[in-house]
Image (cartoon, rainbow, N blue to C red):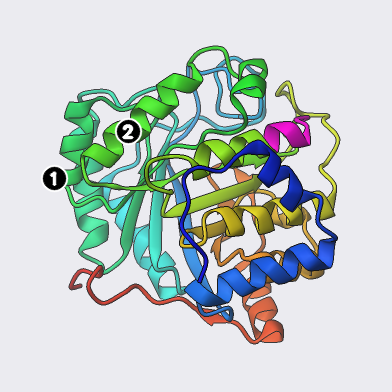
Amino acid sequence: MTIIRHDWQAEEVNTLYDLPFMELLFQAQKTHRYYFDPNTVQLCALLSIKTGTCPEDCAYCPQSAHYRTDLEKEPLMSLEQVLERAKAAKAQGATRFCMGAAWRSPPQKELPKVAAMIKAVKNLGLETCVTLGMLDEEQTTALKAAGLDFYNHNLDSSPEFYSTIITTRTYQDRLDTLERVREAGIKVCCGGILGMGETRVDRVELLLKLACLSSHPESVPINRLVAVKGTPLGDVEEIDDFEFIRTIAVARLMMPRAFVRLSAGRETMSDTMQALCFFAGANSIFYGEKLLTTPNPTINKDRELFTRLGMKEHAIPHSQSASA
């Protein structure tokens, strides 16, 4: 049995990273098998319910109003539009439906509309997740009352590297929102982005921040940067495949009960690389041809890969599912 820890030290994490690749994956797979069926994967759908014109200056994001990209800006979707997409996602096998809005923080007039979306999607029998930017106590209380299961708010990178990619909000702002989400009784979805030009030191510090929270995030999305032309990171060099897989394995060892999700960037990964990520402990993916505004493998391609690997879909625990 792997002990659940919240007191990791940088030296320990560096030691894990420095293990021979096969040894690291073996250790991660053993831990993964203790807590999960190694042949199941959680399918999550992600929909941008409000696109573009975000006032934040995140250097990786095509939705930022600070950069000129080819992104088509869209206002908040209607409840009917969201429900249509949620029903389609469920029919295609997704068990969690995630909704993202490009806001610094949810506008007061829009939050009730999002709450209605959460209630309606949950009534379909799907787990619900939203990412809306920073939240105050009143907002987290309202989202909890709507029945929200998960709130996504990534730390992105280490505190030191963070300041080089975002200046419009602080690292502590993000940690404060995570604390409010926890206090409201909402599960946490929190991870980061690899390949922004950070060093291994930054990746170690990111994992330390996540694993040393008072409670580990229930979901840990690990994104591979999708370099978008027009953003400051549009020409950054892609992270090494083995370094990415190592990070998945170390995340699994440090947060053994979390769903570790392969998120953005899967379109640039070969089937072999994805298979190694699953072996290293990833057991969740974003499913569908688009992630907010960036491309993703087709559903048919993912299903073909699962068939070749003998993997099946993770079901929502009966106690968490709502009646349709």
Q: CA distance from mark 2 to mark 1?
A: 17 Å
Say which residue appears at 45% left-offset and 76% top-offset: 314
* Viewer-nearest of discs 2 and 1: 2
Q: Secondary structure at mark 2?
A: helix
Q: Nearer the viewer, residue 195 or 324?
A: 195
Label ID, residue 145: 1
Q: Which residues are magenta?
A: 197-203
Q: Is 140 placed left or right of 287 in the picture?
A: left
Label ID, residue 179: 2
Say which residue appears at 26% left-offset and 77% top-offset: 318
User: How many labels were placed on the picture?
Assistant: 2
Assess whether mark 1 and mark 2 are in contact (beta carbons under 8 angstroms): no
Work out whether 66 lies above or below 137.
Answer: above
Question: What amino acid is labelled 2 in the image?
Answer: Glu
Task: Residue 104 in the image: state x and y as whole percent.
Answer: 41, 22
Task: Residue 296 in the image: state x and y as whole percent.
Answer: 64, 55
Q: Nearer the viewer, residue 160 or 292?
A: 160
Task: Residue 178 in the image: state x and y as whole percent.
Answer: 36, 34
Q: Residues within 10 Å of mark 2 (few under 14, many from 20)?
A: some
Q: Quadrant of the C terminus?
A: bottom left
Say which residue appears at 75% left-offset and 26% top-offset: 233
Work out whether 178 lies above or below 301.
Answer: above
* Residue 109 visible in the picture: yes
Q: Nearer the viewer, residue 144 or 293?
A: 144
Q: Is residue 199 magenta?
A: yes
Q: Is residue 201 magenta?
A: yes
Question: What amino acid is labelled 1 in the image?
Answer: Ala
Q: Is 99 placed left or right of 36 in the picture?
A: left
In this view, which residue lies farthest toward the left? 145
Q: Secondary structure at mark 1?
A: helix
Say which residue appears at 23% left-offset and 35% top-offset: 140
Q: Is 5 placed left or right of 27 in the picture?
A: left
